[in-house]
Image (spheres, rainbow, N blue to C red):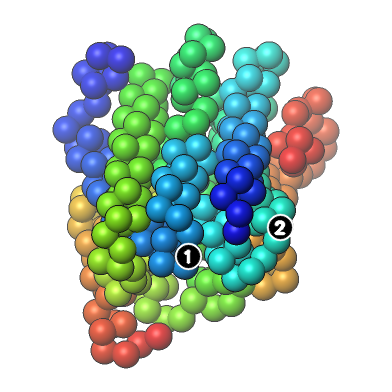
Amino acid sequence: MRSIWRTLDRDLARDIGLVCLADLVVGVSYGAITVTSGFPVWAPMLLSLLVFAGASQFMFVGIVASGGNPIAAVVAGLLANARHLPFGFAIGDVLGERWASRLVGSHLMIDESVAFALAQRDADRRRAAYWACGIGLFVCWNLGVVVGAFAGTVISDTDALGLDAAFPAVMFALVLPSLKDRATRLPVLVGVVVALATTPFLPAGLPVLLALVGVLAGVVAKDPAERPEPVPEPEEVC
Amino acid sequence: MDPVDLIIATVVLAAGTFAFRFAGPVLRARVTLSPRAEKLTAMAAVVLLAALVAIWTFTQDGGFAGYARPAGVLAGGVLAWRKAPFVVIVLAAAATTALLRLVGVP
């Protein structure tokens, strides 16, 4: 564990800290919204500790609070979280060989930790970025939720702070280095168009997964002649 | 909602989510991927993250998110492209959107 902190340079640590801070504020709002919509105080804390995936937690609470079926809320949350399967395939090696670190590391897998890992050049930095971001966010998110659940409506409207624009901008900055690779640009473009075009018609979570057809487009465009050898396509496992 | 039902629903959602998270690294360790397949898995993750950026930027509950948010993301995006420090990107995106909302842009 100590080597992780040694590999983390100042800039990377500061960037990760900033994202953790923003997530803490969103956590406060999540805790407040959940409790004010009639949930017991422990509910947002339990969800945040065990599920630890913001978008699916908001969705779960929203559906149950509006009188929806809890089974529908669970299914919607699972659909939103299915993207972690291809994520794990991409960054699985940063979790190491030991089962303990795989178990803990898997739980820390979220959009931000994956994006930070993918944005690093070498394996050591990837590992350091993943763990630092995962642990930092787990602590900040849960801390924020506890504060929000008890403090109520202190910051229930993060939209007024523009935080909803900060998250996509952060993610864009992290994805940007990967777009330097020309072979990645077409798949990304196709994926983004498919996701946006299907969002009005499909339940949340599904359009993101459908973006994976962009990867197929990349495969087809790259070698029209040569069929790929049995490649485990992430699409199929979903 | 009954507390017991709430706990059961939470645990089921948590278990399913963990299964998704755990399956990737475990399967990944079982199979030896060709360098090409390995590139494809990384590409798939980038495509997913880019799709998330687009959905978060433009949509809200399946509809259009309004103009303030995309404008903020655009400001942050341009700064990211110009290699501005992370702090500047985050603050510019949030401030642009917050100010636009303050003057009444949806």
Q: Nearer the viewer, residue A151 or B90?
A: A151
Q: Which percent across, then down, holds residue A136?
A: 30, 36
Which is nearer the eye, A237 or A25?
A25
Q: The C terminus of chain A lies in which quarter of the figure?
A: top right
Q: Which corner quadrant of the image does residue A139 belong to? A: top left
First-in-chain label (1 vs 2): 1
Q: Amino acid at mark 1?
A: Gly
Q: Quadrant of residue B28?
A: top right
**Relative height, residue A194 to residue A51 (above, below):** below
Residue A183 picture location, percent across and down: 58, 43
As drawn, which residue projects farthest toward the left?
Answer: A10
Residue A213, position as x, y percentages in the image:
72, 50
- Mark 1 belongs to which subunit? A
Q: Work out whether residue B14 can be spotted.
A: yes
Residue B83 appears anywhere in the view? no
Residue where numbered disc 1 is placed? A38
Chain letter of the residue beneath label 2 in the structure image: A
Q: Residues within 10 Å of mark 2 (few under 14, many from 20)?
A: some
Is A31 left or right of A59, judged from the image as shown? left
- Residue B49 in percent (x, y) is at 52, 49
Which residue: 25% across, 36% down?
A12
Secondary structure category for the residue under label 1: loop
The disc placed on residue A72 is 2
Q: Quadrant of the N terminus of chain A?
A: top left
Of discs 1 and 2, which sits in the foreground?
1
- Name the residue: 75% across, 29% down: A232
Residue at mark 1 to residue at mark 2: CA–CA distance: 18 Å
